[in-house]
Image: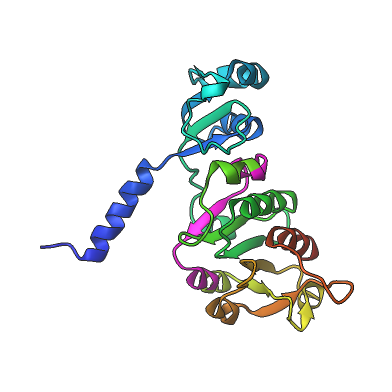
Amino acid sequence: MKKPKWVIAKEQAKRVAANETVWLFGLHAVRDALENPAREKLRLVVTRNALERLGDVVAQSGLEPEISDPRKFAAPLDPQSVHQGAALEVKPLNWGSLEDIALGDGPMPPRLVLLDRVTDPHNVGAILRSAEVFGARAVIAVQRHAAPETGALAKTASGALERQPYLRVRNLADTMTALKDMGYLLLGLDGEADQTIDTALEGRRDRAVALVLGAEGPGLRERTRETCDALVRIDAVGAFGSLNVSNAAAVALYAARG
């Protein structure tokens, strides 16, 4: 019996994902990845100066470093990458299922960050860093039209990518519906919303909350907005008050703390 096309496409996508690797770069990102036992490490390219600065971490990783000339750095990176003489080829991290993270035990009411087509890796990296600082369970984005796990994202995250779950889902609205069924309150950020985050959470800070942020410019898509339980804004002083998406995520996480 011939397999349906969708089954074949799914199997092909799994094979591609299994073979996918990422080049992380920069001393901080490489150090944190080397120290992460959950990270599968494949190849380490360093200059002699970077090797000295990484110290015992390289020896403890079990990888044999490839010493490279800084003027002809051997790792296949974009020429504009600020690699600081260190690059590490790795497999993407596997954080497990949405259910495991969303329903797991924790010291405070769970908070999640959902990103609706946020494509800039620097913004996503900064959001991962804020999510770690404010205790979010995970940052969740779509598989397509979103920033993938890259060296630029890891460098901006300043180590948070190794500790803060970054999940990629096929359909954001379906994921939002699933979170609602798990008891989450979904708040979409919109500068024109009638109520603030504080107002929306009055008397409900013990609830599990997912904050949904859209890309700069387009904002939340129509279906995303409709799937939210409420739209909320960040209060601004003065007539002009807008934040980029990474700053908005940090402020929203602080405002929504349990």
Q: Is residue 162 magenta?
A: yes
The quarter holding residue 124 reads bottom right
Q: Is residue 234 left or right of residue 225?
A: right
* Residue 156, x across and y down, in percent: 65, 44
Residue at image point 27% right, 59% down:
9
Examine the rendered structure and indicate whether residue 25 appears above or below residue 198.
Answer: above
Q: Is residue 121 magenta?
A: no
Residue at image point 64% right, 79% down:
229
Whether residue 46 is visible here, answered yes or no, is no
* Residue 18, x across and y down, in percent: 36, 44
How many numbered discs, if any?
A: 0
Point out the residue furthest to the left here. Answer: 1
Give the colour scheme of this rendering.
rainbow
- Asked whether 11 or 258 is in front, the reply is 11
Quarter holding the N terminus is bottom left
Q: Is residue 189 left or right of residue 43?
A: right
Write down the region rendered in magenta: 156-176
- Asked whether 120 or 95 is in front, the reply is 120
Examine the rendered structure and indicate whether residue 50 appears above or below residue 236.
Answer: above
Point out the residue furthest to the right here. Answer: 238
- Asked whether 79 or 44 is in front, the reply is 79
Q: Is residue 14 left or right of residue 160?
A: left
* Residue 73, x across and y down, in percent: 52, 25
Q: Is residue 184 left or right of residue 15?
A: right
The quarter holding residue 195 reads bottom right
Residue at image point 56% right, 52% down:
166
Whether residue 224 is visible here, answered yes or no, is yes
